[in-house]
């Protein structure tokens, strides 16, 4: 690991730019390529494991494209919807079609969602190029630039979050831009206090507007920006950025504030009180073990640097690296605190996950080179070994996740095919892999804005969407349980509508509003298909409870 001359001022501009491109483009291109692999493995977004929240964000983006405020404002997620609205308008204009915007989007929903995923993936790739360039310019060490650009490979779960239409991909992009700004403080000519305060504040506000968990980034300017005036300037920039980016959702601000209060004042997932707070903590810590080890290594490196600075002082570049590392540790501390409120999935760590490459780069800067810039070979070898081990482990975990995603997509497509029985009326309920169901979910989270238009597209669709006062299901849609149907097919969770996350053994047969023999046509861990041959009276389907529950997919006894 030798000092790179790529940042030397004597090189010609074009030659230097070409060399930087050769050095800085491969890893972001690899990130984008890996994203395509995960996209293909996940399958279409109408699958039941994919449609939430992609379809809700698509429909709320459509509301913005119609110059109407979004209804899905809990996170608040407005920048995601704004980018989606611009993308929808652009795609519709590029299609040069006479079909109005709304029906065109409904009939091309998958195309629109895939385009949005591609846009966010490319934005992140571009941000990684900027981050790597900033680190290279500041440190003149290509190794550290590569380490920053390799951030997504330090968490196998990050790629799953990157290839979806939701806030997390944009959070990753903001984190990468945040890295570029922090890296600027490591160079020989750091930015002025006011410029640093404003830029970091604007990015922190953008992060919080994308998802409230992104407020953790504001911890960095509180540590890094000197003086009360600078901190207040950063706070003002963050507030202004947040308000500007969430302005389209201002009419629904009360909904967002109620959601935040519920999160802050209640227990359980999304403040529902339905789960114990620490149920999943151990599992998520194991899933993101590299991140927590990086935080530990950063803490140790910062502590040693502080002790050394008190004894003998630190030269300016190492002092700048220590300040940046302390700022990152402040972000990590806030992010972990927020995560502990709802420790169920690793996406609650995403803003900090997007910074961990810079954490490692700063640890390497403080640990692997001495005050004179000479390489400490034992420390460098130990760090390379640790990175190689982490890389192998994360690669194996990513391969396992890809295999699981492919299996889930294959099984859900098989469920959809199994539900399409000629002559049968199909009823979908949560969570059912059906394009019509995905559209209905999007409409539900956009205030039922497009209900009538969707019924025109799927006039025979039937859904179990809500329940009557006696607890029995209510069918929604223009289709009917027609006496002309030879049978009825119910597609959704194996446990039925009352147990959307349960297995077949949890099935509550009262959820199916017909009488007759119930048989399992298809079952997988994600969903099942039930066939009911109704016992008719006067040629009409019954509404009584069905007969005995079948076991293990076998038909019930006579």
Image (cartoon, helix red, strand yellow):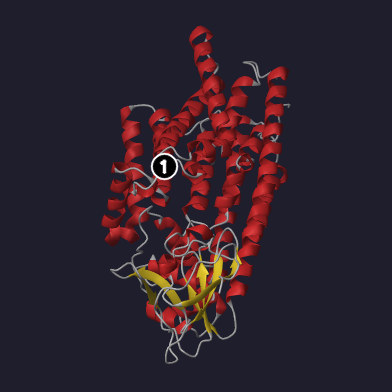
Q: Nearer the viewer, residue 355 or 168?
A: 168
Query: Which residue lies under the disc numbered 1?
Result: 342
Farthest residue in the top direction? 311
Residue 3 seen: no
**Observer-nearest of 180 and 263:** 263
Taking 467 as reference, is 380 above or below it? above
Residue in the foreground of this view, choosing between 206 and 106: 106
Q: Quadrant of residue 480?
A: bottom left
Q: Position of residue 68 (x, y in %)?
A: 34, 69
Task: Please provide percent x and percent y for residue 72.
Answer: 37, 60
Q: Residue at x 58, y 51 (%)?
A: 160
Q: Tell me: residue 426, above or below residue 553.
A: below
Q: Furthest residue to the front?
A: 558
The residue at 66%/58% (across/down) is 407
Regarding residue 533, the answer to whether it shows in the image is yes
Q: The N terminus lies in which quarter of the figure? A: top right
């Amino acid at each position: 690991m030798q000092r790179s001359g790529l940042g030397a001022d004597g090189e010609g501009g074009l030659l230097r730019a070409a060399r930087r491109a050769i050095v800085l483009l491969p890893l972001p291109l690899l990130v984008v390529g890996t994203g395509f692999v995960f996209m293909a493995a996940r399958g279409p977004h109408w699958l039941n494991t994919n449609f939430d929240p992609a379809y809700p964000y698509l429909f709320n983006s459509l509301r913005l494209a119609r110059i109407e405020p979004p209804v899905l404002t809990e996170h608040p997620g407005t920048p995601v919807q704004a980018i989606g609205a611009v993308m929808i308008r652009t795609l519709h204009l590029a299609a040069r079609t006479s079909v109005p915007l709304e029906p065109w989007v409904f009939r091309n929903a998958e195309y629109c969602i895939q385009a949005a995923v591609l846009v966010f993936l490319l934005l992140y790739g571009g941000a990684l190029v900027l981050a790597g360039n900033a680190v290279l310019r500041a440190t003149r060490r290509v190794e550290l630039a590569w380490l920053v650009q390799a951030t997504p490979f330090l968490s196998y779960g990050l790629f799953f979050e990157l290839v979806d239409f939701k806030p997390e991909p944009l959070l990753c992009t903001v984190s990468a831009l945040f890295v570029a700004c922090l890296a600027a403080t490591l160079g020989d000519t750091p930015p002025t206090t006011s410029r640093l305060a404003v830029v970091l504040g604007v990015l922190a506000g953008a992060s919080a507007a994308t998802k409230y968990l992104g407020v953790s980034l504001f911890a960095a300017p509180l540590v890094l920006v000197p003086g009360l005036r600078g901190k207040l300037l950063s706070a003002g920039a963050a507030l202004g950025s947040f308000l500007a980016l969430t302005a389209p959702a201002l009419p629904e601000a009360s909904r967002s504030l109620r959601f935040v209060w519920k999160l802050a004042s209640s227990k359980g997932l999304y403040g529902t009180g339905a789960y114990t707070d620490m149920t999943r903590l151990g599992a998520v810590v194991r899933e993101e073990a590299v991140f927590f080890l990086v935080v530990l290594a950063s803490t140790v490196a910062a502590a040693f640097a502080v002790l050394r600075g008190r004894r003998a002082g630190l030269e300016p570049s190492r002092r700048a690296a220590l300040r940046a590392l302390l700022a990152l540790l402040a972000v990590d501390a806030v992010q972990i605190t927020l995560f502990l409120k709802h420790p169920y999935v690793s996406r609650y760590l995403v803003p900090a996950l997007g910074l961990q490459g810079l954490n490692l780069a700063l640890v390497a800067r403080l640990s692997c080179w001495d005050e004179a810039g000479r390489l400490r070979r034992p420390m460098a070898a130990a760090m390379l070994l640790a990175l190689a081990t982490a890389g192998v482990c994360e690669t194996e975990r990513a391969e396992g996740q890809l295999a699981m995603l492919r299996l889930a997509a294959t099984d859900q497509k098989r469920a959809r095919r199994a539900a399409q029985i000629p002559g049968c009326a199909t009823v979908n309920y949560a969570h059912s892999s059906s394009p019509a169901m995905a559209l209905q979910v999007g409409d539900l989270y956009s205030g039922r804005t497009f209900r009538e238009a969707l019924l025109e597209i799927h006039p025979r669709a039937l859904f179990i969407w809500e329940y009557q006062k006696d607890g029995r299901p209510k069918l929604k849609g223009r289709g009917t349980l027609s006496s002309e149907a030879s049978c009825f097919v119910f597609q959704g969770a194996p446990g039925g509508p009352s147990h959307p996350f349960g297995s077949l053994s949890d099935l509550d047969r009262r959820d199916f509003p017909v009488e007759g023999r119930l048989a399992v046509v298809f079952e997988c861990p994600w969903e099942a298909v039930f066939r009911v041959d109704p016992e008719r009276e006067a040629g009409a389907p019954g509404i009584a409870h069905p007969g005995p529950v079948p076991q293990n997919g076998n038909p019930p006894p006579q």
